[in-house]
Image: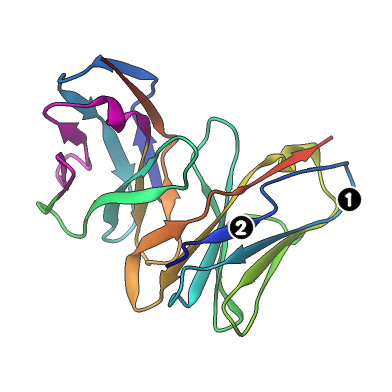
Amino acid sequence: DAGVTQSPTHLIKTRGQQVTLRCSPKSGHDTVSWYQQALGQGPQFIFQYYEEEERQRGNFPDRFSGHQFPNYSSELNVNALLLGDSALYLCASSLLTKTGELFFGEGSRLTVL
Amino acid sequence: GNSVTQMEGPVTLSEEAFLTINCTYTATGYPSLFWYVQYPGEGLQLLLKATKADDKGSNKGFEATYRKETTSFHLEKGSVQVSDSAVYFCALTTTGNQFYFGTGTSLTVIP
């Protein structure tokens, strides 16, 4: 049973560029959440997707957007990258009907130069 | 608002020592509380949880009790092993959607 998979694992961008990160949830899960984890910090909630709709959003600017596909996989897009966007981006999947247990991928490490 | 304050690390212990990692929280409403663990090279995984006051979560020898009166959820283990070396995150949710995490506590256990 494959867990949560994320790609790419590492990437380097320059300021002003755009990036797309991808996530495949654990088999059987229908909900995907994205978190940003800066160095030395805990994960910060970006948003959550269910049934291809954004259900809830954290305190992140509109430069951060997402999408969920019919197969439950998800993308996180960040436009107009800033140096401060450098972080580990974590995808977590869950079942909407079973709140409280998130299954995390290993993350995508984004470096903005 | 909602937030989690976690004991700062890093923490270094000898094998078989007693472990306590402190966690306190602020929440609107009635949160569920969690401890997640991140082993080297792996994603975060749920260690234990408690959904209401006075509940005790336990797993792999770790325990934490949901204390509403002190707004705390301290993690304890009676005898740590080298394999427990990891980063531990305390977290809460009031909606089941958005989780609030602490900054993490790095634990190293030496033989």
- Identify the residue under disc 2: A6
**Which chain does the residue under circle 2 lie in?**
A
Spatial distance from mark 2 to mark 1, Cα to Cα? 20 Å
For mark 2, give the secondary structure: strand
Q: Residue at x 86, y 52 (%)?
A: A80
Magenta stretch contains residue B81? yes
Q: Is residue A78 visible?
A: yes
Task: Name above or below for residue B103 compared with residue B65.
Answer: above
The span shown in magenta is B58-87
- The earlier-in-sequence mark between 2 and 1 is 2
Q: Nearer the viewer, mark 2 or mark 1?
A: 2
Q: Residue at x 57, y 78 (%)?
A: A72
Q: Residue at x 59, y 82 (%)?
A: A71
Q: Position of residue B93 (x, y in %)?
A: 36, 58
Residues packed near mark 2 inside 10 Å, few (<14), some (14 to 19) or many (20 plus):
many
- Identify the residue under disc 1: A17
Identify the image quadrant of the C terminus of chain B: top left
Which quarter of the picture shows residue B51?
Answer: bottom left
Identify the amino acid type marked 2: Gln
- Whether the residues at callouts 2 and 1 have beta carbons within 8 Å, the answer is no
Which quarter of the picture shows residue A79?
Answer: bottom right
Q: Position of residue A37 (x, y in %)?
A: 57, 43
In the picture as drawn, the residue positioned furthest to the front comes out as A1
Identify the amino acid type marked 1: Gln
